[in-house]
Amino acid sequence: MEIKTALTYDDVLLVPKKSDVQSRQDVDITANLTKNISLKIPLVSANMDTVTENRMAIAMSLAGGIGIIHRFCDIETQVKEVIKVKRKQNLIIDNPFTIHPDRTLAEVKTKITELNCTSFLVTADGHKLLGIITHRDMLFATNDNVLVSDLMTPKSKLITAAPDVSPEEAKALMKSYKIEKLPLVDAEFNIVGLITATDISRNLNNKQASKDNKGRLLVGAAIGVREGFLERAQALVEAEADVLVVDIAHGHSINELRAIDAIRNKYPNINLIGGNIATAQAARDLISAGVQAVKVGIGPGSICTTRITTGFGVPQLTAIFNIAPVCRQAGIPLLADGGIKQPADLVKALAAGSDTVMIGGQFAGTEETPGPTLNYKGRQYKISRGMASLTASLSRPDAKENFNQITPEGIEARVPYRGPVQNIINQYIGGLRSGMSYGNARNLAELRNNAEFIRITHSGQIESGSHDNEVI
Ligand code: XMP
């Protein structure tokens, strides 16, 4: 039997090329997450319960990447996390707060405190817009019994817009009429939404963020393949998650193929990523089943022990090398998941053929991860754990096994607190941009096409790090 050699990031280096890239800022690192979703940076935060909930997903999306909300919670909890991201930078508020015209000023004031808002659209039947009441309308009102209908700016004086108004048009209207709220109405004057001045300037000023066509941040959500996965998928689609990731440890399995088929049939247009896989045949099968990106990585993760528990896995660089040609031919992006320890690994993953890269361990310990910061011997830490670790397995809502029956394929770890994730992203993106200038690459396609890998020896690895110094 011929036994092939397989390599990972530390086994190789990229050979420098004559470069006409003048500045690291000149390179374009736009990347495809799926066939239909493009990101400004090729980074995705991992769907692990110690990495991605709404705070991480918001930070990733604001930075130009995306976060995938983990599935290790009930459907309702996961949906709430997705909604928090979608509402974060709402350009259009789909369900603005409303009030009846017969309510009093006192009632308005109570609702303002309760809901932490500053204005209400006025409607008697819950649909037709009659007016708006904002802090300006209440400025000099002293009688708490006065009715909303007497205070509001009535329909006749309202500036409104159609639901498909663009951010630029909305801004122009608000500027010329000096208003802070722009109600959106249909032809019958039914309320369809609301745009606020704060949201619009935040939205237009942030060109880096990953946004949907309503100007809201992009977010992904993971689902499994067992009982209840279709209900979860449906709830996440209704919550307007932008991409679903069918994520199980062994993605090249009948269960996963059936799940993809079921989801595809029910939601033909949803962006779907399938994984995890490590072979070309697995990629072919998932692509035939209908995914729009494949997630690659069996056992490379920082908290993974699948390879030492089961004996199965493929070193990550070889997995990418083997799968990338299949993906390229099918026009389906490759998401390399796991094993990233330093910026060079990101550059190597992209040069080897991945389109985007998922990171867990390197983002664990940042401010935006779920969970508290712990103090140990005067230092601050956060917890990172594999989703097949002992504690994660035991804490599943559906956990049936007890302590002795679980065979973990992951570990739990203490990781130093690292501050905001943006600092880590900056290091990775800085390394990538610099790497692209060594590779004479103005974009990620050129990085791939120009890539010449060499295999290095153990001495080469030692030479590659800092050496013969006492690091301070
Ligand atoms: P990094 O290296 O970025 O890898 O921390 C993150 C990826 O690791 C995978 N993962 C696991 N793999 N057992 C495994 O074998 C586990 O318990 C486990 N938990 C997470 C996952 O693909 C993640 O994105």
Image (cartoon, grey):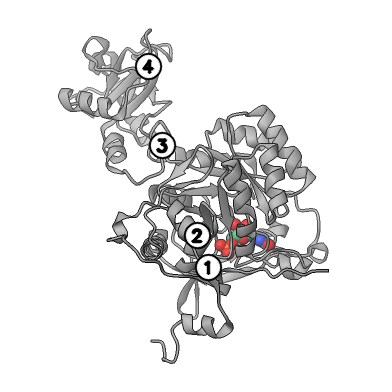
The one of 204 and 395 positioned closer to us in this rendering: 204
Report which quarter residue 308 is drawn in: bottom right
Cα distance between the residues tagged 3 and 1: 39 Å
- The answer to whether 126 appears left or right of 232 in the picture is left
Q: Nearer the viewer, mark 3 or mark 4?
A: 3
Residue in the picture at 34% in, 46% down: 208
Residue 259 visible at all: yes
Q: From the image, which quarter does the C terminus lie in?
A: bottom left
Q: Which residue is mark 2?
A: 351
Cα distance between the residues tagged 2 and 3: 31 Å
The label on residue 216 is 3
> Residue 143 placed where, x, y %?
22, 22
Q: Going from the N terminus, do you reach mark 1 or mark 4 first? A: 4
Q: Which residue is mark 4?
A: 100
Q: Going from the N terminus, do you reach mark 2 or mark 3 first? A: 3
Are the residues flagged by discs 1 and 2 in contact, CB closer than 8 Å? Answer: yes
> Residue 293 placed where, x, y %?
59, 44
The one of 467 and 207 positioned closer to us in this rendering: 467
- The answer to whether 130 appears left or right of 9 in the picture is left
Q: Which residue is mark 1?
A: 453
